[in-house]
Amino acid sequence: MFRTLPMMALVIIAYNIIVYLTGLSMDTQVTTVTLISGAVWSIDVGDIIVFSGLVLLFLELISSTQTNASTIINHALSMLVLLVALVEFIVLPEFGNSTFFALVMLALFDVVAGFTVTITAARRDFTVGE
C-alpha cells in the first residue's frame, strides 16, 4: 500500500499540518546560513517544504520507471493529490501563496512526468523483442 501512496501527498499533508496544527506561517524563519561570500541565506518554513517537495518529486520520478499495477494506482492517486491541492489553493486563504502554488506545480509535474516516464518505459519494454 505504501508504494502506491504518491510522495507528493506527504508534502501536501505536511503543509496542512503546519498551517492548521502549528499555526506557523510559511515566512517563519527557521535558520540562517552565512555563505563564503558573506551573504546571509535565510531559510524559512516555506523553503524547507518546497525543498522537501523537490526531493520527493525526484524519488517519485525514479519509482515511475517501473511498470506494474501499483504504478498505475500511484498515478491515479497522484491525480487526486493534484486535484485536492488545486482546490485548496483556489478555495482556502491559508493556501493562496507562492509556496503552496509551487507545491501545486510540483504535483502537476509529478502527474505529467509520471505518466510520460511510465509510457516511455512501457514502450521500451514492449519494443525490446522487435
Image (cartoon, rainbow, N blue to C red):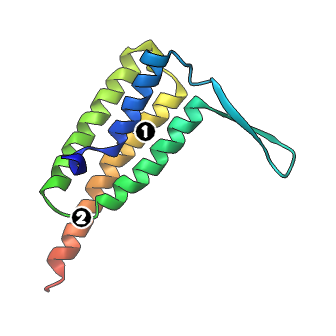
Residue 100: horizontal and vertical position, in percent? 47, 29
Q: Is residue 34 left or right of residue 113?
A: right
Q: Nearer the viewer, residue 72 or 129?
A: 72
Please tell me how crowded label 2 is: few (under 14), some (14-19), or many (20+) other residues with Cα within 10 Å: some
Residue 16 sits above or below residue 31 on the image: above
Dot 1 falls on a residue whose secondary structure is helix
User: Which kind of residue does numbered mark 2 sit on?
Assistant: Gln
Residue 89 sits above or below residue 104 on the image: above
Residue 26, picture quadrant: top right
**Callout in the foreground (2, 1):** 2
**Residue at the image position 58 percent from the left and 30 percent from the top:** 45
* Sequence-earlier tag: 2 or 1: 2
Q: Is residue 130 left or right of residue 6?
A: left
Give the residue at mark 2.
66
Please tell me how crowded label 1 is: few (under 14), some (14-19), or many (20+) other residues with Cα within 10 Å: some
Residue 58: horizontal and vertical position, in percent? 42, 55
Whether tag 2 and tag 1 are in contact, CB under 8 A, the answer is: no
**Residue at the image position 49 percent from the left and 18 percent from the top:** 22
**Residue at the image position 40 percent from the left and 24 percent from the top:** 16
User: Which kind of residue does numbered mark 1 sit on?
Assistant: Met
**Residue at the image position 36 percent from the left and 57 percent from the top:** 61
Residue 13 sits above or below residue 88 on the image: below
Q: Is residue 125 left or right of residue 82?
A: left
Residue 112: horizontal and vertical position, in percent? 32, 49
Q: Residue furthest right?
A: 38
Dot 2 falls on a residue whose secondary structure is loop
Give the residue at mark 1.
105
Residue 105: horizontal and vertical position, in percent? 43, 39
Residue 92 sits above or below residue 15 on the image: above
